[in-house]
């Protein structure tokens, strides 16, 4: 029983890490109605910026403290992401207003390759570390109930807390603020949003900056855990089926789908892997997402689309 719980908790923590990326996918989709294939590259770009700014801040006299270095790096990264969001809106999205969704989809693919290239050009192509002071030592739970207790990775636990806080803040933003409701209106109908005075340029600038903020949180957590390297952008591949499971329009659904993916892949790999040759963890999420699409295309918590004629 102890081993089962440890595996399930490990899957839960992995799912919360996926959710940090999945939230960004949902955020862009809610505001633009298009799936953003560039978000994985945005996570990498944000992590590279954070790592390099923190490294450069360490060479400045008076910034010897880890807290000060990270604070300077976070501010510099947020400014960089704001400038990046403005460039994407100004030179790409503003020219594609009222275009077909497939056009915007192809644009995000182009943005993804652009971010990979610019990130490597500006910040370098090495492997960098992010140190934000998260505890590295594991926590042992239930030592009196189970032999050797249950091992919990504290980095993953902090990532879970960050995911929950981010979901609460974004949910409040979309439901309670004027700009949040405006972004929802833009996602529903761009022409109608324009007719009531909502500026698409400002809306897209804001949503790309918010996506950059979620990417920064995801990049910091994943970079602290695995190091910042260009393979980090492939983390987004595991978040895609999680988003499909939870629903493209639901921020809480991003967490639900990510948890299902994380727990499911860990349990199946441990208990079924030895019987089928292993490798289940690679394809489990995609097969599960495909099965759900056949019976519920909008996902578990997504909004059902009803076409009226």
Image: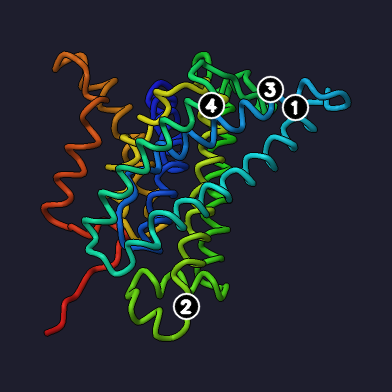
On screen, residue 67 versus residue 155, left or right, reads right
Nearer-N-terminus badge (4/1):
1
Q: Which residue has dot 4 on it? A: 223
x and y, in percent, of residue 7 in the image: 39, 25
* Secondary element type, mark 4: helix
Residue at 48% of width from left, 54% of height from top?
208
Asked whether the residues under the numbered discs 4 and 2 touch, taking CB atoms below 8 Å apart as contact, a structural biologist would say no
Residue at 53% of width from left, 53% of height from top?
209
x and y, in percent, of residue 186 in the image: 39, 72
Dot label at residue 198: 2
> Callout 3: few (<14), some (14-19), or many (20+) C-alpha neighbours within 10 Å?
some
Q: Which residue has dot 1 on it? A: 57
x and y, in percent, of residue 185 in the image: 40, 75
Q: In this picture, is 219 found above or below 123?
A: below
Nearer-N-terminus badge (2/1):
1
Dot label at residue 262: none
* Secondary element type, mark 2: loop
On screen, residue 117 versus residue 275, left or right, reads right
Dot label at residue 55: 3
The front one of 228 and 270 is: 228
Nearer-N-terminus badge (2/3):
3
Residue at 36% of width from left, 39% of height from top?
112
């Amino acid at each position: 029983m102890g081993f089962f719980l440890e595996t399930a908790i490990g899957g839960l923590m992995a799912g919360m890490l996926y959710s940090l990326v999945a939230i960004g996918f949902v955020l862009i989709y809610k505001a633009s109605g298009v799936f953003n294939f560039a978000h994985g590259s945005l996570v990498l770009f944000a992590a590279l910026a954070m790592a390099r700014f923190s490294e450069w801040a360490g060479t400045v006299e008076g910034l010897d403290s880890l807290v000060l270095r990270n604070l300077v790096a976070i501010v510099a990264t947020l400014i960089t992401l704001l400038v990046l969001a403005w460039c994407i809106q100004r030179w790409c999205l503003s020219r594609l207003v009222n275009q077909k969704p497939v056009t915007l989809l192809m644009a995000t693919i182009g943005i993804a390759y652009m971010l990979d290239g610019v990130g490597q050009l500006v910040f370098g192509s090495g492997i960098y570390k992010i140190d934000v002071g998260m505890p590295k030592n594991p926590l042992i739970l239930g030592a009196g109930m189970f032999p050797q207790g249950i091992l919990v990775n504290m980095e993953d636990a902090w990532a879970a807390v960050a995911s929950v806080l981010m979901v609460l803040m974004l949910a409040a933003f979309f439901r309670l603020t004027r700009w949040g409701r405006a972004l929802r209106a833009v996602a529903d109908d761009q022409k109608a949003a324009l007719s009531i005075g909502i500026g698409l340029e400002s809306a897209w600038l804001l949503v790309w900056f918010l996506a950059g903020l979620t990417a920064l949180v995801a990049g910091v957590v994943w970079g602290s855990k695995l190091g910042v390297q260009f393979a980090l952008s492939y983390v987004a591949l595991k978040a895609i089926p999680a988003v499909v499971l939870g629903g493209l329009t639901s921020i809480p659904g991003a967490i639900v789908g990510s948890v299902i993916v994380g727990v499911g892949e860990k349990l199946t790999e441990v208990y079924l892997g030895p019987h089928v040759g292993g490798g289940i963890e690679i394809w489990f999420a995609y097969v599960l997402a495909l099965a759900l699409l056949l019976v519920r295309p909008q996902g578990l918590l997504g909004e059902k689309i009803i076409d009226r004629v």
